[in-house]
């Protein structure tokens, strides 16, 4: 059936014309070599030059495609490299964190041992009070100072209060020792001799645990201060810890 004379509705005309224009444009976007030669002949360009121009254009397009592929390959390589670097950084960061956390735990554990020995010293104070009260030169001020310092140490609710109480306890023990030196009868007492032995042993243990604590702090602080582990320490909130000075019985604050 011949539909060449069929009538097209008016409302379809714009759409039909648009599609027809597109199809015509697609058909005329490419030319055969003979079309190209004919176009060159019209402007009096020799066929060999037209062929040479065609080859150059094709070569340029090929080179451009190769260049684009190479750029894409470089981008992929860079992406892989950056991904590898990120993996290495994350692994190193995790390892460094574990090392710092372990060393911080060692510092805290070492300080706990110092606290144990400080508690032993506090437990000796009732014996110091008994010896003082048994002395002929019974000194109520020293007894009160000893009892108060021990009560303050045992009732401490936080580390700051504990440190303050430790300083007072040190002063009370020092006052007792000064008192004992001036009392020959007290120095001759067997109870006092035994107590002096206990005090000396406790102080030696405190000195030993203080040394271990300082060694743990030294190792930890060295990593905190060194590069690049110091970067991880700063980002994750690791802070330097103070040493427990041998010439000072004041104890440092721990911030973990």
Image (spheres, rainbow, N blue to C red):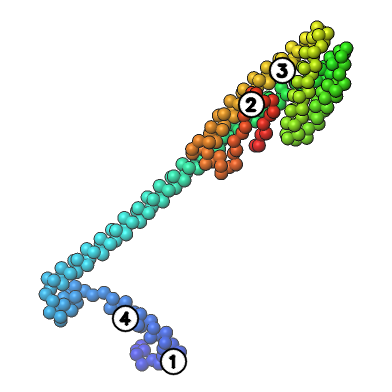
Identify the element where label 1 is drawn.
Answer: helix
Nearer the observer: mark 4 or 1; the answer is: 4
> Is the C-beta separation of discs 2 and 4 under 8 Å?
no
Residue drawn at (66%, 34%), measured in percent from left and top? 254
Between 228 and 68, the residue placed more toward the observer is 228
75 w.r.t. 136: above or below: below
Identify the element where label 2 is drawn.
Answer: loop
54 w.r.t. 184: above or below: below
Residue 154 position, x and y percent, is 80, 28
> Is the C-beta separation of discs 4 and 1 under 8 Å?
no
User: Which sits earlier in the primary sequence, circle 1 or circle 2?
Assistant: 1
| Neighbour tally class for label 3: few under 14, some 14-19, many 20 plus, Cα within 10 Å | some
186 w.r.t. 23: above or below: above
Question: Could one spot residue 119 in this view of the protein?
Answer: no
The disc placed on residue 202 is: 3
Say left or right for 27 vs 55.
right
Nearer the observer: mark 1 or 3; the answer is: 3
Residue 134 position, x and y percent, is 87, 13
Q: Which residue is labeled 2 in the image?
A: 245
Q: Which residue is labeled 4 in the image?
A: 24
Nearer the observer: mark 2 or 4; the answer is: 2
Residue 166 lies in what quarter of the image?
top right
Nearer the observer: mark 1 or 2; the answer is: 2
């Amino acid at each position: 059936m011949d539909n060449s004379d069929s009538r097209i509705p008016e409302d379809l005309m714009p759409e039909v014309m648009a599609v027809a224009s597109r199809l015509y444009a697609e058909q005329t976007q490419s030319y055969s070599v003979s079309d190209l030669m004919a176009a060159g002949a019209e402007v009096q360009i020799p066929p060999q030059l037209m062929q040479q121009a065609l080859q150059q254009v094709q070569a340029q397009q090929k080179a451009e495609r190769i260049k684009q592929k190479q750029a894409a390959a470089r981008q992929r390589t860079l992406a892989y490299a950056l991904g590898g670097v990120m993996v290495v950084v994350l692994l190193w960061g995790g390892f460094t964190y574990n090392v710092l956390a372990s060393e911080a735990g060692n510092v805290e554990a070492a300080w706990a041992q110092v606290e144990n020995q400080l508690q032993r010293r506090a437990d000796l104070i009732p014996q110091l009070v008994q010896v003082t009260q048994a002395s002929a030169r019974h000194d109520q001020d020293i007894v009160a100072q000893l009892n108060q310092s021990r009560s303050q140490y045992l009732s401490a609710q936080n580390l700051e209060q504990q440190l303050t109480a430790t300083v007072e306890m040190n002063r009370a023990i020092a006052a007792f020792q000064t008192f004992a030196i001036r009392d020959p009868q007290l120095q001759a007492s067997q109870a006092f001799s035994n107590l002096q032995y206990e005090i000396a042993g406790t102080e030696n243990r405190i000195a030993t645990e203080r040394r271990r604590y300082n060694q743990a702090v030294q190792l930890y602080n060295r990593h905190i201060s060194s590069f690049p582990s110091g970067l991880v320490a700063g980002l994750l909130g690791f802070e330097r810890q103070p040493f427990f000075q041998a010439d000072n019985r004041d104890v440092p604050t721990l911030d973990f």
